[in-house]
Amino acid sequence: MKRWRRAHPRHARRTFLRAGVGAVSGLALAGCDNLSRSEWFPKVLDAATSVNAAIANVVGRRALAQEFSAEDRSPTFRSNGTADPATAQYAAWVASGFATYTLDVGGLCAHPQRLTLAQVRDLPSRTQITRHDCVEGWSAIAKWKGARLAALLDAVAVKPEARYVVFYCADPMSDDPTDLYYESIDLDDARHEQTILAYELNDAPLPVPNGAPIRLRVERQLGYKHAKYITGIEFVASFAAIGGGRGGYWEDQGYQWWAGI
Ligand SMILES: Nc1nc2c(c(=O)[nH]1)N[C@H]1C(S)=C(S)[C@@H](COP(=O)(O)O)O[C@H]1N2
Ligand SMILES: [Mo]
């Protein structure tokens, strides 16, 4: 636990945070005309998000996101956000074909583990064709294969006091090398049938621009929740002491933590 905290210190740089929130609101206003027609946009940036979360709880957190057939797939699945973490560590993993990559799984669990990509691929898997919706106004349908996150939770024996799963990523979001992309979901979403640690996109190994070697698919939430380049997974009772304290890189800039579609 201590090592994790050192690697991902809380960022209390208020001026940075204020600047970030301002920039996001400005973008939201500028993009309003284009985006207001979409069904999901209002759910992301206003208070309806919490209503949406409440409805999701009543309707059932286990309901599946829509799945599509092979013909429905988009011709290409674009990259958004980081397209290459470009750190020395990441470049070394790419050079090894991810043979030297490891995934640290720890926090509130009985059996913390360091897994190779091969070990992740050995976990029970799921394949699904789903639609990805990004708040920037694009969607795409693709086929994903990955390890069921529920299987990993069972393998490490998550403790009952764990409430959230935090995903630490390889890509720095500023000149500060500790300012890494991160995300979090709750245990209901972690155990959801369609929540996978994806290592294949459209029947090929996950490409670097889409988060190689492992990225999260959490199909009932918006694109920014789908953490790419995952290097660490931590089970926590609270994410208040991680990053800016709001549960994710974009959440720290003002986005909603719950991004249900
Ligand atoms: N590590 C990391 N994960 C990330 C991002 C990022 O910049 N870094 N961008 C997010 C956003 S906003 C979206 S829409 C999707 C884009 O996934 P794609 O690049 O496969 O299209 O990844 C999400 N996960
Ligand atoms: Mo996005």
Image (cartoon, rainbow, N blue to C red):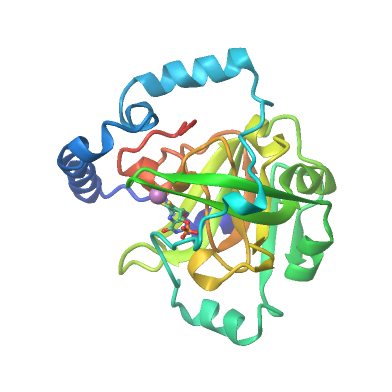
In this rendering, would 89 be left or right of 163?
Answer: left
| Residue shown at 63% from the left, 34% from the top | 189
Q: Residue at x 65, y 19 (%)?
A: 60
As drawn, the residue found furthest toward the top would be: 58
Percent x, y for residue 102?
Answer: 68, 69
Q: Quadrant of residue 181?
A: bottom left
Q: Nearer the viewer, residue 138 or 236?
A: 138
Q: Report the number of discs.
A: 0
Residue placed at 60% from the left, 80% from the top?
93
In the displayed structure, would residue 252 be above or below residue 106? Answer: above
Percent position of residue 211, x then y: 54, 64
**Which residue extends farthest front?**
71
Q: Position of residue 235 (x, y in %)?
A: 65, 43
The quadrant where residue 198 appears = bottom right
Residue at horizontal 71%, vertical 55%?
Answer: 146
User: In the rendered image, is residue 160 in sight?
Assistant: yes
Residue 33 placement (x, y as % from top left) = 18, 36
- On the question of residue 1 being in view, the answer is no
Q: Is residue 196 left or right of residue 121?
A: left
Q: Quadrant of residue 144?
A: bottom right
